[in-house]
């Protein structure tokens, strides 16, 4: 059996990470692909899936708040750092499953995973050669060109920090009109159109800044791929196929 692939769902608060972790897992069950879910959010309250490995077994946000006299944000930061200490236990627990896919649901606020050292550390400790970041672009920010550019920048920053393969997802795309979805996909493929739309949105200083920002985005080709996902498993097969292509040259694990 090949080594497992780690998929890290990362995105701003409420962008749909836990829901996508859950629907990806359900989808793999229907298709006979073996996958497990890992919750890395010590403050998660109502997860839409039952995690196979759960950081809350080792760290509780509430306990850290009480024992250190911290508010929720300070405690989240302390927890993020503590996760690194539990990485060997997490690894052992994941290894006990012998699976194909490890679906990693990261903490609510993106900065806890992306900007603290622990996120990087976990990825390196687990399996950096077999890891991919699924970066969720919130549908609400894909409605305007400037919102979309700001999300691409955050995606690029995530890539810069974690230095792993990365794929951009347009999450909750069922909340967009068909026209809005097509427009976001066009922007992801055609940075000239994206630039022209941004330039028409705002004044001249902004235009100059947009031009420079888009040049950076273009250079890293981070705009190139955008996978829309949404309710009723929309987009998951395409996402799975892209990940398989990246690691297994397209070989399919599906049983049917
Ligand atoms: N319509 C629609 N709603 C979605 C979708 N995915 C998530 N949601 C809703 O968006 C909200 C946030 O979803 P979560 O999956 O909890 O998002 P998250 O990124 O894990 O949130 P935090 O961990 O709290 O930052 C919930 O109310 C979900 O039901 C989707 O594809 N379509
Ligand atoms: Mg979540």
Image (spheres, rainbow, N blue to C red):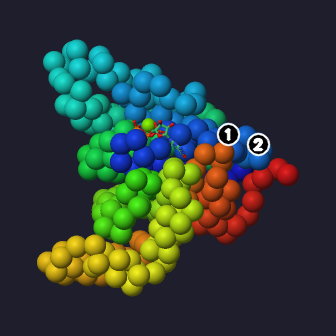
Which disc is residue 255 wearing? none
Callout 2: helix, strand or loop?
Answer: helix
Nearest the camera: 53 or 85? 53
Nearest the camera: 188 or 244? 188
- The x and y percentages for residue 113 are 33, 45
**Can see residue 117?**
no
Task: Choose top left, top right, bottom left or bottom right for residue 55.
Answer: top left
**218 sits to left or right of 35:** left
Q: Mark 1: give few (<14), some (14-19) or many (20+) Cα within 10 Å.
A: some
Which disc is residue 26 wearing? 1
Q: Is residue 32 above or below residue 157?
A: above
**255 sits to left or right of 207:** right
Q: Is residue 143 above or below residue 75?
A: below
- Identify residue for label 2: 30
- The x and y percentages for residue 102 are 57, 44
Q: Do residues under tags 2 and 1 come within 8 Å of each other at their CB atoms?
A: yes
Residue located at (36% from left, 42% from top): 13
Residue located at (28% from left, 73% from top): 201
Residue located at (21% from left, 15% from top): 67
**Can see residue 109?**
yes
- The x and y percentages for residue 171 are 50, 53
Ligand 1 under 8 Å from disc 2 Cβ:
no
Q: Is residue 196 above or below residue 23?
A: below
- Mark 2–mark 1 Cα distance, whole angstroms, equals 6 Å
Task: Choose top left, top right, bottom left or bottom right for residue 94.
Answer: top right
Question: Which quadrant of the figure shows ligand 2?
Answer: top left
Nearest the camera: 218 or 133? 218
- The x and y percentages for residue 119 are 35, 46
Q: Is residue 165 above or below residue 120?
A: below
Callout 1: helix, strand or loop?
Answer: helix
């Amino acid at each position: 059996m090949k080594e497992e692939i780690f998929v890290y769902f990362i995105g701003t608060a409420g962008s749909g990470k836990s829901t996508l972790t859950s629907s990806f897992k359900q989808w793999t069950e229907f298709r006979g692909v073996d996958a497990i879910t890992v919750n890395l959010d010590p403050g998660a309250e109502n997860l839409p899936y039952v995690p196979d490995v759960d950081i809350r077994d080792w760290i509780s946000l509430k306990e850290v708040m009480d024992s250190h006299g911290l508010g929720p944000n300070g405690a989240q930061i302390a927890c993020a750092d503590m996760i690194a200490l539990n990485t060997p236990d997490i690894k052992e627990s994941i290894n006990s499953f012998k699976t194909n896919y490890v679906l990693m649901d990261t903490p609510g606020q993106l900065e806890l995973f992306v900007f603290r050292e622990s996120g990087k550390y976990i990825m390196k400790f687990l399996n950096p050669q077999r890891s991919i970041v699924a970066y969720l672009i919130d549908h609400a920010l894909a409605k305007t060109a400037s919102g979309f550019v700001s999300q691409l920048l955050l995606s690029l920053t995530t890539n810069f920090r974690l230095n792993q393969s990365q794929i951009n997802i347009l999450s909750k795309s069922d909340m967009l009109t068909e026209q809005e979805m097509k427009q976001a996909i066009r922007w992801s493929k055609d940075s000239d159109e994206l630039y022209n739309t941004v330039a028409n949105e705002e004044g001249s200083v902004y235009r100059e800044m947009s031009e420079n920002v888009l040049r950076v985005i273009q250079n890293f080709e981070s705009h190139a791929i955008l996978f829309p996902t949404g309710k009723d498993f929309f987009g998951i097969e395409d996402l799975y196929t892209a990940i398989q292509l990246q690691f297994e040259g397209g070989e399919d694990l599906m049983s049917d």
